[in-house]
Image (cartoon, rainbow, N blue to C red):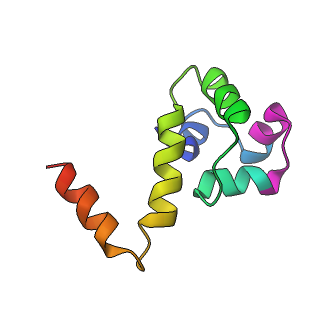
Amino acid sequence: MKLKRYLRLNDLTSTEMALELGISHATMSRYLRGVSLPPIRIARIICKKTTAMVSQNDLVDQYLEFNLGSKKNKSFRTWKNKSML
């Protein structure tokens, strides 16, 4: 599950989650959008706080979708769509 969806389903704000993780709101925003990948220490804390509803793989997938799945890189989106068939 994406972190943003988890927050929405649990009525949490990104600011609240950032405070729980001990990171800035700006950093949390980058994780939510997939712009940045959290360090392993933070990723583990996210998994623990979400009772593994958001896994480390989810965080990596979101990062890859943002960075490789953009309009600039159609081959990644094509590969991902084919691999899901």
Image position, residue 1 (x, y; %): 46, 37
Q: Quadrant of residue 30?
A: bottom right
Give the farthest residue toward the left.
Answer: 85
Assess whether residue 25 is covered by the magenta stretch: yes
- Residue 84 position in % (x across, y down): 20, 48
Q: Which residues are magenta?
A: 16-26
Of residues 20 and 8, the one nearer the viewer is: 20
Please identify the dominant SS of the magenta region.
Answer: helix
Instruction: From the viewer's perspective, tell me whether residue 11 is left or right of residue 72.
Output: right
Q: What residue is drawn where x is 72% and y is 44%?
A: 13
Left-right relation of 60 to 40 = left
Q: Residue at x 42, y 80 (%)?
A: 72
- Across and down, in percent, residue 51 comes to 57, 19
Comparing 16 with 45, the one in front is 45
* Residue 80 forms part of the magenta stretch: no
In the rendered view, tell whether residue 22 sits above or below residue 48: below
Q: Is residue 8 left or right of residue 79?
A: right
Using residue 71 as the reference point, say whether residue 40 is left or right of it.
right
| Residue 43 in the image: above or below residue 74 | above
Residue at left offset 75%, top offset 37%:
17
